[in-house]
Image (cartoon, rainbow, N blue to C red):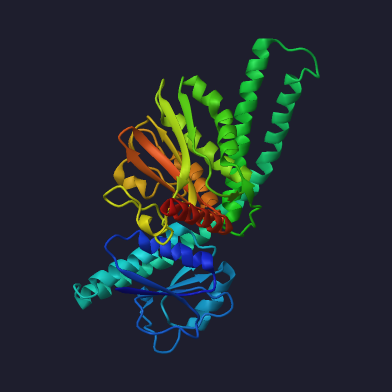
């Protein structure tokens, strides 16, 4: 068993580490969140996250391949001076999922071949990897500079877009004089395109800002049906251009889902826009929503071979609401399914289903901030994007109590 110790007080970082470790099939891992004072020797990987002072405890293996330090950019020089000759891997905060996953993968491979690989080969490999780690740190710094620049540029870009959309609305209202039906149709199309650009600019800004500061969500009891209806309304002009039919089938929510309406609407629009883009002319997009039992221990949807959800017998009440968006477009290569939600990820061949990774990366960012999960799978009818949003804890308790009462009444009768 691979023993991983996370020296941090951040629950979101603990969740991210758990999700990354769960992605490695066949690797038995034990993740422990602890403090620097309680850090025990003998772990196979240490992930250090201390904003004040990071001290490697006495007795802890100093092998750099077993340590990852999460630091703010301004603290790197001070830490290097303090650590002396200790060769370590450094990830700049805010750490990205891709960079942390890469180092966890390296640690996992080191753990698996620690016994089978000769010592001389391990030494040569570690020397090469140390050079790569230093190069990676410089690339992280360049990436942060690029992100800061793009965030500022996108912020300035949104203002003229908003103004142009307003001018289109002014012309459509005929406040400046009458316009013909043909001119109105052109203005509507312009306004629709401007809205799409504005949404993308806002999403790019959110994606850039979210990596550097955590925003408190304005969660409130929400109706997913209204969000889906609005998203379908927004995307209908794009679907009509290719004669794509959109069907919606929604079951009532079994409890209260807390969400930020605008953000969930953005997720739905991104997924539907992606589906329209890759669905052939005269194709079909199907939207389904229904209460769902989500096994949150693994952080993903989980179905047994017999078709029933894992731990189904432990609780018959759903704890989330699931939305599936399936289209009749081409399937996604299996080797790219796991990376399609990464930023700027794409695959070669045909048209890029991920759209550069931006729209789908934003979807995952929003759903994750809502404590939910988003994924994709190929079906016999085409690709299907799905996400789940948890039902609020009080709502789950009330729902389970209601279910238990109903079962008791049935047994009594």
Q: Is residue 158 left or right of residue 333?
A: right
Q: Residue at x 31, y 67 (%)?
A: 108
Q: Residue at x 59, y 78 (%)?
A: 52
Q: Is residue 294 left or right of residue 44?
A: right
Q: Position of residue 80 (x, y in %)?
A: 50, 77
| Residue 29 visible in the picture | yes
Query: In the rendered image of this protein, does residue 164 appear above or below residue 255?
Result: above
Query: In the rendered image of this protein, does residue 276 appear above or below residue 178?
Result: below
Depth check: 316 or 98 in front?
316
Q: Tell me where residue 164 sits by quadrant.
A: top right
Q: Tell me where residue 72 sits by quadrant.
A: bottom right
Depth check: 382 or 130 in front?
382
Q: Residue at x 27, y 75 (%)?
A: 123
Q: Position of residue 247 (x, y in %)?
A: 47, 28
Q: Which part of the image, by quadrant, shows the N terminus?
A: bottom left
| Residue 136 visible in the picture | no
Q: Position of residue 302 (x, y in %)?
A: 36, 53
Q: Tell me where residue 263 sits by quadrant.
A: top right
Total labels: the figure holds: 0
Query: In the rendered image of this protein, does residue 302 appear above or below residue 386?
Result: below
């Amino acid at each position: 068993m691979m023993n991983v110790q996370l020296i941090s007080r951040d629950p979101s970082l603990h969740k991210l580490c758990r999700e990354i470790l769960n992605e490695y099939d066949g690797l038995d891992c034990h993740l422990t969140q602890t403090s620097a004072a309680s850090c025990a020797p003998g772990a196979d990987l240490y992930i250090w996250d201390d904003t004040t002072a990071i001290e490697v405890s006495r007795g802890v293996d100093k092998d750099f391949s077993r340590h990852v330090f999460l630091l703010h950019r301004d603290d790197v020089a001070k830490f290097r001076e303090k650590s002396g000759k200790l060769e370590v891997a450094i990830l700049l905060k805010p750490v990205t999922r891709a960079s942390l996953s890469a180092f966890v993968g390296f640690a996992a491979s080191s753990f698996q071949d620690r016994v089978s690989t000769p010592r001389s080969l391990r030494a040569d490999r570690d020397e090469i990897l140390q050079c790569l780690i230093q190069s990676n740190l410089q690339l992280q710094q360049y990436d942060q500079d690029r992100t800061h620049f793009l965030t500022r540029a996108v912020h300035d870009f949104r203002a003229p877009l908003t103004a142009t959309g307003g001018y289109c609305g002014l012309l459509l209202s005929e406040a400046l004089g009458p316009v013909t039906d043909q001119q109105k149709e052109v203005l509507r199309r312009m306004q629709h395109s401007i809205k799409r650009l504005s949404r993308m600019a806002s999403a790019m800004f959110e994606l850039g800002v979210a990596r550097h500061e955590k925003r408190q969500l304005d969660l409130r009891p929400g109706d997913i049906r209204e969000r889906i209806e609005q998203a379908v309304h927004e995307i209908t002009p794009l679907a009509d251009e290719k004669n794509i039919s959109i069907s919606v089938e929604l079951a009532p929510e079994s409890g209260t889902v807390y969400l930020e309406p605008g953000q969930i609407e953005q997720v739905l629009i991104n997924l539907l826009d992606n589906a329209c883009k890759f669905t052939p002319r005269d194709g079909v997009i199907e939207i389904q929503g229904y209460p769902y039992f989500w096994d949150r221990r693994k952080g993903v949807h989980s179905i047994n071979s017999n078709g029933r959800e894992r731990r189904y017998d432990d609780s018959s009440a759903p704890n989330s609401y699931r939305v599936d968006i399936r289209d009749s477009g081409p399937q996604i290569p299996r080797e790219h399914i796991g990376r399609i939600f990464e930023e700027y990820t794409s695959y070669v061949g045909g048209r890029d289903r991920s759209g550069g990774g931006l729209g789908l990366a934003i979807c995952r960012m929003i759903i994750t901030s809502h404590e939910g999960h988003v994924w994709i799978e190929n079906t016999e009818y085409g690709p299907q994007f799905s996400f789940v949003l948890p039902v609020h804890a009080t709502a789950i308790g009330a729902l389970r109590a209601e279910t238990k009462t109903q079962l008791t009444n049935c047994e009594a009768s």
